[in-house]
Amino acid sequence: MNTLAKYCVINKLDSRFATPGYIRRIISAMSTEASKSTTKFEEDIEIPDRIERTSTDILEALASTVGKDYTAPHYRYYDDPWLTPYTNYEKRNFWLAKESGRSAARFILDRHPHLFEKNRIVAEPPITAFQPRAVLNIDNVSPELLDNYISNLQVEDAITVYNLLKEKKKRISGETEQALLELLAYNAEEEELTSENMTTKGMITSNKSWATGGMAEQLYSSLQTPEARLAILLGTAKYKMFSRTSQIWEEMAANEDVVPIEGYNAIISIQSAYDFKELKGNIIAYLTKMKNNNILPNEDTLVSCLSAVARFLSKASRNSEPGTQFALSLLAEFKNIGVEPSLGAYYYLLNIFYTRDSKEKSMILVDILDVLEQRENLWPAKTLKDFIFFSRAMEVAKNLNQIKLAYRIHNLLHTGNNQNLLTSFQLSNNYHNYLLTIVLKNEPLDVYMSLYEKLVPHTFSPMSSHFMDILMAINTRNCYLHYFHFFVSKMFDGFVIFTLSYEIVY
């Protein structure tokens, strides 16, 4: 069918009875419509700007369409009813066993690398972490190998190679020694945490401390440069070596070193005094020095100031009123210069207002939540202390016995990507323990059991004391139907529940 016939069919015309003049008018109308459609088609074409995508954008888009599966175990555990751990003790043993297995595999790989020479799995590019480590001796070490270990953050191997190079009397550049000093000072001469052992270290109380007289101190004594003094200052301040940090600061002042903002943040964070007036004067003096040197404070500076105030008030028999007033004035001044308080700053603000000896129950948590709820997303974190905020805020809500504040905190945590701020095993346990405790005290048992079924046992595993609180609540409220449901559904802790229930009911 030609174009004229199609036009007649579309417009319900009979071309057999059309005159020549009428056909010319049809062709003219067709050309006019074609030009209009072409013009309209050209105007509608708009090539959008290229949007940069990351490798996880598609996964994040898919994840945003579904909610959390509370019936499935955490990703770090096996999705198998016979192997999934349900209690804190089992979860800890599970992860420790997993890390022990990796360590055993690494030991065999390093001691017997010849067994893996014919490995059929070829990695392109090769992954250094999965390859056997070279056996170190005095003949095969070199400054280039030391640089490689430093860049890969391998602390123990870097120390070994450095000592071998010194025995061999090889020349090591000042830049390499400075890089090694920074690595040792930041990690306190211990291996840095990786994605494999970070979870395990979060389950066990860390006793990591500064190595007095260690390799970092020796490197600092041999270098004696402004960069070396700054590295030791940041390391000692990180591991709470207050007197040593003050000593290094005096050396930097005597040598008239140019101190960056990280140095000021470190020296402010370790400030202490016998009375609050002295502490306030010290903090203001350092902030004044920053202003005179044209150094603009940042979020870490505010966190450092508030941490010094919170540590001063944490000691027994302290008057918290001057500290609270000074903390609020710091927040106002930092907002005036464009520094928005981070979650870490609000964490220390809660510690300042809610001390152990404070008699008045301040409601500043309400004001903090009002500010945070106006932000679209609190992730990514701005300071390291941001990860502690939600656990501390829920603890304050529990101590105040304010169920509405607890729900606001819980909703804020589940907004956007804020759940990434509660990934620590211990902090997550504390948060959910405080949440369930306050819900049990203030809500009907039906509401509590609904939340309990959601969180236990995959998200949170209660301790025996919490089981006792549940059974006491069931007994005092005469809700024995929940008692039998609770008893049957939690058979993995049946012995504890049976013992407690026998003491309560009988």
Image: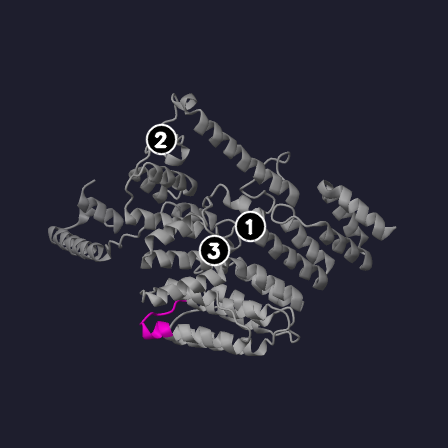
Q: Which residue appears at 18% of the width and 57% of the height? A: 39
Q: Nearer the viewer, residue 375 or 25?
A: 375
The quarter of the rendered structure image containing the N terminus is: top left
- Name the residue beneath numbered marker 1: 207
Q: Which residue does the image show at 50% across and 42% down from the upper left?
A: 197
Mark 3 or mark 2, which has the lower sequence index? 2
Q: Quadrant of residue 79?
A: top right
Categorize mark 2 by other alpha carbons within 10 Å: few (<14), some (14-19), many (20+). Answer: few
Coordinates of residue 335 in the picture (x, y in percent): 42, 74
Q: Is residue 379 visible?
A: no
Query: Distance of mark 3 from mark 1, alpha carbons?
Result: 31 Å
Q: Which residue is mark 2?
A: 123
Residue for badge 3: 417
Q: What range of the chain is rendered magenta?
A: 289-299
Q: Which residue is pictured at 40% across the width and 36% down the height?
A: 129
Q: Secondary structure at mark 3?
A: loop
Q: Counting other residues with Cα less than 10 Å from the Cα at mark 1, is it few (<14), some (14-19), or many (20 or more)?
A: few
Point out residue 446 in the picture as x, y percentages from the top left corner.
72, 56
Could you say whether the residue bearing mark 2 is in a helix, strand or loop? loop
Q: Position of residue 63 (x, y in %)?
A: 47, 48
* Residue found at the far right of this picture: 506
Amino acid under disc 2? Ala
**Frontmost residue, 318 versus 83:** 318
Asked whether residue 296 is drawn in magenta, I would say yes
In the figure, 500 relative to 371: above or below?
above
Q: Do the residues bearing badges 3 and 2 touch, measured as CB atoms within 8 Å?
A: no
